[in-house]
Image (spheres, coloured by chain):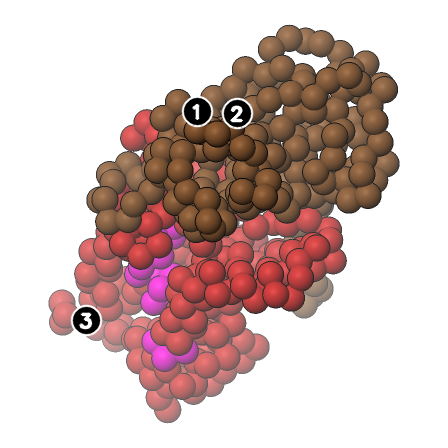
Amino acid sequence: MAPTTDPARRGMFPKRTVYLLLGLALFMPPMVLLLQASTGDDSFCGSWCPRMFFLWREGSSLSAFLFGWLRSWGGVLLVFAIIVVSFFFGRLWCSHLCPIGGFQELGNRLIPNKLSIPFGSIPAVPVRYGYFAVYMIAPVIGLGSLACNYCNFAAVPRVVAAGFGSPADIAYFLRTAGMINLALLLLLGIFARGGRAYCNFLCPVGAIDGLVNRFSSRFGKRVRIDRHSCTDCGKCVPVCPTTSISRKEEGHQIDQLSCLPCGKCQEVCDDAAINYEKRTCSSTVAAQGATP
Amino acid sequence: MFRWKTIVVFVLAVAISAIAANYRFGDSAHAIGMLSIKGGKARHPFMITSGKDGYTLIMTGVVLPPYQGDVKVVLEGSPAMNYAIYDSEPVIDLGIHRKPKLEGSILRGVQSRDKLALWVVMSPQSEQDLEALFDESPESDDEGLMSDIGPAGHEPLKLGFYAADSGQKLLNIPILFADLQPEGGSHGSHH
């Protein structure tokens, strides 16, 4: 099949970089526009947290737990908005607005590809949901907490603010946990091929989002491979930042548990076989959590 | 084969994550407190480990009504520490919301229901033998939280919040060395 000549088709989201920069402006130093305007916080680690409000903490009373939800209304609202958007449109939060994923991806664009670490050989789904299971269960059974200890929502804004000389944010990294978070940010973020290994392996929001993306894929728009147009050339496989595309017996398939609608696969598809669309007749075969 | 690989990776991920969740680094800790004119309440103490060159404490809290005014923040007790206190501020402050401002050790303009987030970076003043200091430490109270656990004959180490004008106690958060506490005195969690 001849390569597509329609420039409008190349890149499902040509303005994605603009959206990512908007996400940084809204949630990240130096501006933190949305947080400053709403809660008055200067980072995710202020009076609310988008990830921790749903955790049952050792020694918590029911009233304290419910009050935590109310107090963390911003986090509740944000997570539910992410889920609703993912249901209908796929993981647009992760691919377009998330300031943490965006910072790592934009940072990775500055790193030569040969210096980037490929994580494609590590199966992301079992790592992600193994980590996520412990993330949710450990506080309930009093084992401890992964939240905060290993949190890029805390580390990334502090890296930026520390770069501006903020003493409190510099203090965050003057301890073992801070240094480990910095290492995670560098290894799984900026130096990971595609900049999305942290999103793919460890992000709890990404884990929830992935489940919604997968189990509602028949209802909403997703990145899909048109079976009739696909020539199985495999060009899309190495460019996927979440290693979501793999070759199966039936041809190439996209794992909707991991796929972000970033559009990179479509940009390299010469056959116009990858589209961001609702399920159609030519893309209805689903197997083991994957859709073509 | 594929399914077995998936299961093995999942089990490995669970095991490593569980170890990571359970492990404590000992050089940093987080505590949550509520400041009030009744003396305040800490949900749990800071739990750190002895023998580190430096420590970072993260305190988050809320000011309960009706208190309002300036608040003095001090690290007090034994073992003596060099320390610095920082509050977290936006790099570019848009000035949309009023926030108390830390000037030296005084939080200026604190009002009821304000939320506080402070960072304390501290290091021991001398290489005194902490274990010897704690040898005759009194037992903890029934909850092991707001107790007087500290080196024998010394005030225990704590982060104190006081009304700047009257000196009235608003909150004390004990700082405990987890490895030196008697049984039952090591409650709490830290980050």
Distance of label 3 from label 1 (alpha carbons): 59 Å
Residue A160: image x %, image y %? 34, 37
**Type of residue at label 2?**
Val
Q: What is the CA distance from the residue labelled 2 to the residue labelled 3?
A: 62 Å
Of mark 1 and mark 2, the one earlier in the sequence is 2
Taking depth in this image into account, of B133 and A206 the one nearest to the observer is: B133
Within-10-Å neighbours for mark 3: few <14, some 14–19, many 20+: some
Q: Secondary structure at mark 2?
A: strand
Q: What shade has chain B been given?
A: brown
Chain A, chosen colour in render:
red
**Residue at the spot of label 2:** B74
Q: CA distance from mark 1 to mark 2?
A: 7 Å
Magenta region's main secondary structure? helix
Residue A241 picture location, percent across and down: 40, 56
In the picture shown, does residue A139 fall above or below A88? above
Res. B65 mark: none
Question: What residue sits right under mark 1 in the picture?
Answer: B105
Front: mark 2 or 3: 2
Q: Is residue B147 left or right of residue A291?
A: right
Question: Is residue A92 covered in magenta?
Answer: yes
Q: Is residue A68 above or below residue B183?
A: below
For the record, the magenta segment spans A86-106
Question: Residue at coordinates 65% horizontally, 30% vertically from top-left?
Answer: B175
- Evaluate if marks 1 and 2 touch, with contact meaning CB atoms under 8 Å apart: yes
* Residue at point 23%, 55% (across, down): A22
